[in-house]
Image (tube, coloured by chain):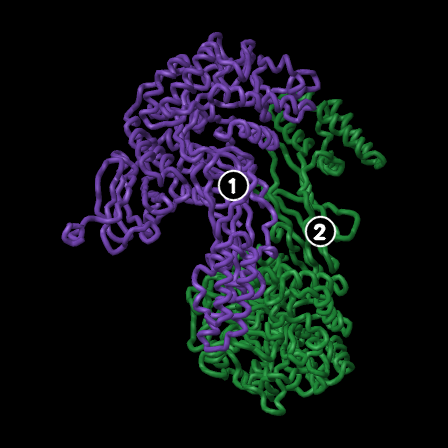
Chain colours: A green, B purple
Amino acid sequence: MLPDVDHGRFPAKRVVGESVTVEADIFADGHDTLAAVLRYKLKDAKDWTDAPMTLLVNDRWAGEFPVTELGRYVFTIEAWVDHFETWSRQLAKRIAAGQDVKVELELGARMLEAAAARADGQTPDAARLLAMSRSLRAGKSKDLDGQASALMRRYADRSLATHLGREVEVLVEPVRARFSTWFELFPRSAGTLKDVEKLLPDVAEMGFDVLYMPPIHPIGLAHRKGANNQPAQKGEPGSPWAIGSEEGGHKAIHRDLGTLADFQGLVKSAKALGVDVALDIAFQCSPDHPYTREHPEWFKHRPDGTIQYAENPPKKYEDIYPFDFETEQWRELWSELLSVFVYWAEQGVRVFRVDNPHTKPFAFWEWTIGELRRKYPDVILLSEAFTRPKVMYRLAKLGFSQSYTYFAWRNTAYELYQYFSEITRPPISEFLRANLWPNTPDILTEYLQTGGKPAFQARLILAATLGASYGIYGPPFLALEGRALKPGSEEYLDSEKYQAREWPRDDGMRELVTIINRIRRENPALQSDRGLRFHLTENEQLLAYSKATPDNENVVLTVVNVDPHHVQRGMVSLPLDELGIDSDRPYQAHELITGARYLWSGPRNYVELNPFSMPGQVFRFRRRVRTEHDFEYFL
Amino acid sequence: MLPDVDHGRFPAKRVVGESVTVEADIFADGHDTLAAVLRYKLKDAKDWTDAPMTLLVNDRWAGEFPVTELGRYVFTIEAWVDHFETWSRQLAKRIAAGQDVKVELELGARMLEAAAARADGQTPDAARLLAMSRSLRAGKSKDLDGQASALMRRYADRSLATHLGREVEVLVEPVRARFSTWFELFPRSAGTLKDVEKLLPDVAEMGFDVLYMPPIHPIGLAHRKGANNQPAQKGEPGSPWAIGSEEGGHKAIHRDLGTLADFQGLVKSAKALGVDVALDIAFQCSPDHPYTREHPEWFKHRPDGTIQYAENPPKKYEDIYPFDFETEQWRELWSELLSVFVYWAEQGVRVFRVDNPHTKPFAFWEWTIGELRRKYPDVILLSEAFTRPKVMYRLAKLGFSQSYTYFAWRNTAYELYQYFSEITRPPISEFLRANLWPNTPDILTEYLQTGGKPAFQARLILAATLGASYGIYGPPFLALEGRALKPGSEEYLDSEKYQAREWPRDDGMRELVTIINRIRRENPALQSDRGLRFHLTENEQLLAYSKATPDNENVVLTVVNVDPHHVQRGMVSLPLDELGIDSDRPYQAHELITGARYLWSGPRNYVELNPFSMPGQVFRFRRRVRTEHDFEYFL
């Protein structure tokens, strides 16, 4: 059955306005006709609604239901032998063979009468059934029409129906959980939260709808880190992830950034522009965090009595104390951490990026996210777990709305094809929504370090068109910052993690970002990952893929040259039938970045991509091209 | 997890002497080392045995356990964070980095002490752990050797272990459920059961180990069918599947065939030759069956009071009354039908071929087979359900040991490749064992009708080497009978279903059958479907596949020309590494039908198959060919 995440252990995911298509194998012994319904409701509602299921092929049935509200839906399946349909199908064959059907008509009449009894109180229907029954007894089988089937299904005897025997959950989230465009910046590089507020119109104009800031809390002094991850000199600001000082912890704002009122103002101004402010939830403490004094029992202690700092032996991170989630006082600790989410939700925050969730217990996330979503069903949580695939998948199943992926390290066409074929299809697509980042403060890939502007352009186009959600660590991306701390490292030189930076406004990326984000807004096909299909290019440096809405009303083809150093050309093959394009007539390929229009015909078409002008093209298809038949006198 | 048939709803299947390899995703948050065990037992036993699981790759773990007795085993999985291994791995890194490890040694010492406490009563182990603990406190970490890990795992603290939370069943059947060679004949064509007994040495000599006879019960007179499915003339014997007359029903023997004593004698003589007599269980009645008089309530009645005959509208089968399995008296009916199996089991029958199980309720089979197997855990049941794939699969899941397949209608190389790739791999291979029949009394395929002797030879070789179990409807197969009732029909002309036939002893097939069955007995690779792999041939008329034992000790390659009309030739490509063959040295391909030996080298080798001499070849590989290094003075 689909969807059915780990046999119902976890909910499938949808967003408001989508539908849930359920597929199941439904069969019985013998050759009787079956009937099946999908039954669904909001989890806490009382009454079920039935949606019909129909046979696809090979005993596979499908049905669907819409999800229109945030929260949890449940569905189940009920199927039964449809004796009336079986009888009706066989009757037709008997009549066609010229057999005496007197006995069969009597059997049918009895079924109609029984249904009439079940329709008791619904007088018109019962009367209609009884009338048909009388017709049969009078030998007039033709008086049964399509309505008989519909009526008999409505009043079917389902007392012997087979039930799925369990309720499968569907978690329904806001549309932005599926389609979002993130811009990350360090607020201290802008100055204060008020300065960030001034950047909002610019961010919104570029087409971003989530503004994500690393932690904004007070930063510890003990073992503080300075520029390029060296011990801090006096006056250096430290890493925002070393959370907590005498000023406060996870619910406080760093005094250099401003006040709670400033923050509330920022959130409000952003909302007015359609932008969500996303906070970073990093559940760890600097040694100066108030928790370390007020709740030493929430931390592990070494035999010498000191609190255990974070480490990945032999590396030590003495500026960070991890929580001991399995402490005897875990209930208090977990409640407090939940209250951190709730505190910021109360300030209007609905989007959270969660730092390293894979180093905290699965059970903690399932409980915390469940509780948070009960209060705030519109929260969106992005899981920052760069770890093994199955752990990433588990976190998604536990309730994270979106997940960082390995996108940053998938740079060849084949790698991208493989990886996105895997994660955008069931079963993974039922619970995981990818959020694609070409760069983050921790990840400056070798591709970006060595590929120059074409590499940034290609990665932007890929992220924004492969993923319905994507994000950039904005200022250095716009500035084409490609300098690493040292060869072989993915750390930025002079990383903003340890120091404020001033960034040039941009280096020609701003325009492309703005165009690409507009294309995303204008093309619903790009707002979901469900319709993703890869296409043959006959050149291994060219990656081609399309996305389409389920009705094929909007079809967008992207072709990217993943080689940032050379012109690449090749033929792109499209499955025109699947894309709803008439293969007998030319069709228009409208290139949305440049605005150029091409006339294509047939499934194979030529593309040539020069990375030094633009490494990618995004085409929208117009199915039909005008011909003389479009003139009025032909109509 | 594998095996896990429908999330544990049905058991996986094995035979005595096999092992069960269990694979599962096992992971935790964080980066600690894990430990896992597979726990298993006979279902009714009290104590569990642990078998270690080891990490394969990508959080996938595997373990295995042997099944040595008939009946039901259960297994489950337990996994936990191995704190000692984690500590030990990190300690090595710390020491390598030259860090002060005093505190870590203390932590390790405490873990050893705690384990010693858990080992209480096992004095030598506890003493050893305590000694190691003292060594650590003395700073001597080198005193920990491989034994520490093993001991610490033995006394691991599993109080916080994660459990699978359910017990997964494995049904263990006799070896013959996996590896069997069937010969079907109509006893009345031989004469009596005593005459059949005289044929036994011949059947055994040809290498068959199951002798299967269509129903041997009294045959009804009402609407009896005669030659070629016409209404019977006086004196015609009728179809053995029209079971029951005044003489008796499913527990009686047709008087023309002999007595119960004759039958018991046949079973006994067969056993002495290593042959099982298989009976046909067809749960349906002729209108003359005693049940119709004694238990009319076990049948459906028409409005006119008559019993409902079988039909597939507009076709009527008035010589057959199906049972009404959903009658009010279903308990009595089901019990009686179970008693039919039990009756014949009491006469020594252990192998049953079940006619059309897909037209009886699934629940009936699950209950009946379960009860039967409780009394006779060594029964083998072959499901004759030529119906939709999912219904066939369900019947296998419900307990049938073997299943007829679509083999008869898979005649091109690609069809065979596709179909057998599907059914011999998980998940299907966990519950379904194919039994391959080139022909049956109901199925004379067009391939056999038109292909002549090469077609019979090719189908025999395919059935016997693709399937660990196969069977032939023997006399007409040996006689190369290819005449159908009419064009487009798969019915035999003058079918034995309606009349006795005399068959010529054979037409040259007997020798090939005997050789092929000997090859099957001598090559364990052919006695299981697990090691089946298909290979490229560069000719679509040539099908090549190999079977190998898990240790690659026995590797058998079969190449068949599926075109019965033309010589076909091509290169066969073998994955030498997977087959355990040294690719740098020549190897011997011993063709087992003709006895010819070829020297092959490298993965690609030439084959040419002339259907008019022999359409298939079966090679056994000798890994090494003698060279001068084999002379004594090189050793």
**Residue type, numbered disc 1:** Ala
**Residue type, numbered disc 2:** Val
Q: Nearer the viewer, residue B585 or B176?
A: B176
Determine whether the residue tagged by mark 1 lies in a helix, strand or loop: strand
Residue A175 seen in the current view: yes
Residue displayed at 70% across by 34% down: A160
Q: Quadrant of residue A434?
A: bottom right
In the rendered structure, the answer to whether residue B16 lies left or right of residue A432 reads left
Q: Let me know if marks 2 and 1 both belong to one chain.
A: no
Q: Which chain is mark 2 on?
A: A
Q: Which chain is mark 1 on?
A: B
From this view, report whether residue A489 is shown above or below residue A380.
below
Q: Nearer the viewer, residue B389 or B520?
A: B520
Q: Position of residue A282 (x, y in %)?
A: 65, 73
Determine whether the residue tagged by mark 2 lies in a helix, strand or loop: strand
Residue displayed at 57% across by 77% down: A317
Provide the residue designation for mark 1.
B12
Q: Nearer the viewer, residue A620 or B384?
A: B384
Q: Nearer the viewer, residue A627 or A553?
A: A553
Provide the residue designation for mark 2.
A74
Bin the neighbour count of mark 2 within 10 Å (Cα to Cα): few under 14, some 14-19, many 20 and up.
many
Q: Quadrant of residue B590?
A: top left
Bin the neighbour count of mark 1 within 10 Å (Cα to Cα): few under 14, some 14-19, many 20 and up.
many
Q: Position of residue A103 (x, y in %)?
A: 69, 20
From this view, report whether residue B367 is shown above or below residue B28.
above
Q: Position of residue A175 (x, y in %)?
A: 69, 64
